[in-house]
Amino acid sequence: MDLIIVLIIAFFIGAVLGFIFQKSQFCMTLILTESFLFNNHRRMVGLIVAILFSTILFNIAFFSGLIESFNLLQNVGVNPAFFKAPLILERHIIGGLIFGFGMILAGGCVAGLLFRIGEGQLSSVIGFIGLMSGFAGAFLLETLHLFENSITVYPSGLLLPMILGVDSIIFTIIIILFFLLIVLALHYKFNVLAIRK
């Protein structure tokens, strides 16, 4: 597939996602803030539904072998191993904490920063510059091989059920049921599924 076609497809997918994010104000920071500080769980239910759909679709694509064919960048010469970095627990836990802390300071997640930039908010531009600086710093540290002596490293391409030694289908069903129970519990307590008039 030609690079131009890949870029056009990526542009339209990005435009559709950007429209959805902006209209729904889909932002992880906003979702967590509303849910934990203001007991407003409607956006949290939307996030859980998004996780459910992505979990189901990913597993369908993975077990049917469609993931590689959906990898448009591989068709223009990008090494597929780039998307399958090894799981290094220490780096991921520390990186996740730093990212979460920065997300709170910036006032939004990556999606939130991007659609707020489109709305013309200057503070989100500053947050996005900080985000890209963090990515560049992490890339530099990785390039210089400063953290080669990691404790827990799993090979690339492993999924969580493989690491835990659990059957993938059973694990997926358990995760889906778990999130459905959360949605039902939130609806029972806060009536989050009620249609607003």
Image (tube, rainbow, N blue to C red):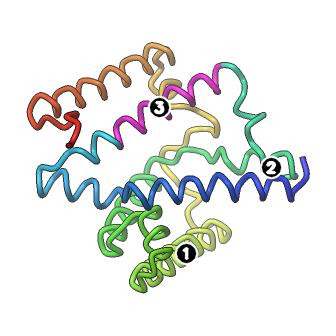
Compared across the picture, whether 24 is left or right of 32 comes to right
- Of the image marks 2 and 1, the number of the one nearer the N terminus: 2
- Percent position of residue 6, x then y: 80, 53
Mark 3, residue position: 53
- Quadrant for the C terminus in the image: top left
- Percent position of residue 196, x then y: 21, 42
Give the SS element for disc 1: helix
Give amino acid for label 1.
Answer: Met
Residue at mark 2 to residue at mark 1: CA–CA distance: 22 Å
Picture quadrant where residue 136 is located: bottom right
Compared across the picture, whether 98 is left or right of 16 comes to left
Mark 1, residue position: 132
At 62% from the left edge and 57% from the top edge, which residue is drawn? 14
Give amino acid for label 2.
Answer: Asn
- Percent position of residue 181, x then y: 24, 24
At 45% from the left edge and 53% from the top edge, which residue is drawn? 92
At 52% from the left edge and 53% from the top edge, which residue is drawn? 150
Mark 2, residue position: 79
Q: Which residues are magenta?
A: 47-63
Give the mark toward the camera: 2 or 3: 3
Q: Is residue 138 above or below residue 124?
A: above
